[in-house]
């Protein structure tokens, strides 16, 4: 699994002119899933996301987590995170998991985030054409891959 984590002052997701997610202050997380992903990938990423110390403390030092600042989270599925650009100019998405594998993992990711945060999160809609709006705060953007734990 790959995630792109963005610290945001605000973010929203719109599908067919209908706003389905809207928040102030927190994280916007884009999630890409491959066939080999499993619950252990979810567990590792969820713990990392919730406990990342990327929010400023009283001294303007990134020392606080999403839990510490009681921030919100929007999770958006994004198969293009696994694009291969090795050949030619049109990306290949062959590495991205098919819906029958990805959807249950995506749903488990949502449940795991909610359990770890102790509250509901907002999401996009798997497979939908989404318009994602955000105001990146910092900017702070972090990429993590559960298969390459650096």
Image: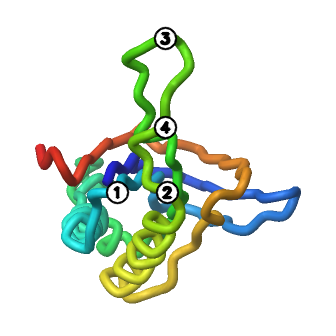
Residue at 67 percent of width and 47 percent of height? 133
Residue 62 image offset from top left, x and y in percent: 25, 50
Residue 56 in the image: above or below residue 88 = below
Spatial distance from mark 1 to mark 2, Cα to Cα? 7 Å
Apparent side of residue 37 relative to residue 97 in the rendered image (left or right): left
Residue 98 is marked as 2
As measured in the structure, the alpha-carbon distance from the residue carrying label 2 to the one carrying label 4 is: 10 Å
Q: Tags 1 and 2 in contact by the CB under 8 Å rule?
A: yes
Residue 139 in the image, given as x and y percentages of width and height: 43, 36
**Position in image of residue 38 (x %, y %):** 26, 68
Q: Residue at x 19, y 70 (%)?
A: 40
First in sequence, mark 4 or 1: give its number: 1
To which residue does mark 3 refer?
Answer: 88
Check disc 4 and report the residue beneath it: 93
Give the alpha-carbon distance from disc 4 to disc 1, as whole Å: 12 Å
Q: Does residue 64 appear anywhere in the picture?
A: no
Q: CA distance from mark 3 to mark 2?
A: 23 Å
Which mark is first along the chain, 2 or 1? Answer: 1
Determine which quarter of the picture holds residue 69. Answer: bottom left
> Residue 126: which quarter of the image?
bottom right
Instruction: Give the x, y percent position of residue 15.
Output: 78, 59
Q: Which residue is mark 1?
A: 35
Q: Residue at x 88, y 57 (%)?
A: 17
What residue do we see at 39% from left, 42% from top? Answer: 95
């Amino acid at each position: 699994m790959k995630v792109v984590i963005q610290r945001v002052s605000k973010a929203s997701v719109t599908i067919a002119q209908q706003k389905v997610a809207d928040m102030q202050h927190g994280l916007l997380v884009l999630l890409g899933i491959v066939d080999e992903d499993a619950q252990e990938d979810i567990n590792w990423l969820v713990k990392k996301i919730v406990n990342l110390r990327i929010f400023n403390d009283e001294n303007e030092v990134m020392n606080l987590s999403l839990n510490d600042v009681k921030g919100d989270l929007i999770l958006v599925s994004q198969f293009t995170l696994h694009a291969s650009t090795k050949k030619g100019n049109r990306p290949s998405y062959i590495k991205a998991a098919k819906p029958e594998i990805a959807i249950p993992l995506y749903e488990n990711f949502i449940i795991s985030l909610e359990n770890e945060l102790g509250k509901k999160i907002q999401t996009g809609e798997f497979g939908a054409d989404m318009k994602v709006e955000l105001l990146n705060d910092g900017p702070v953007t972090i990429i993590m891959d559960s298969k390459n734990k650096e």
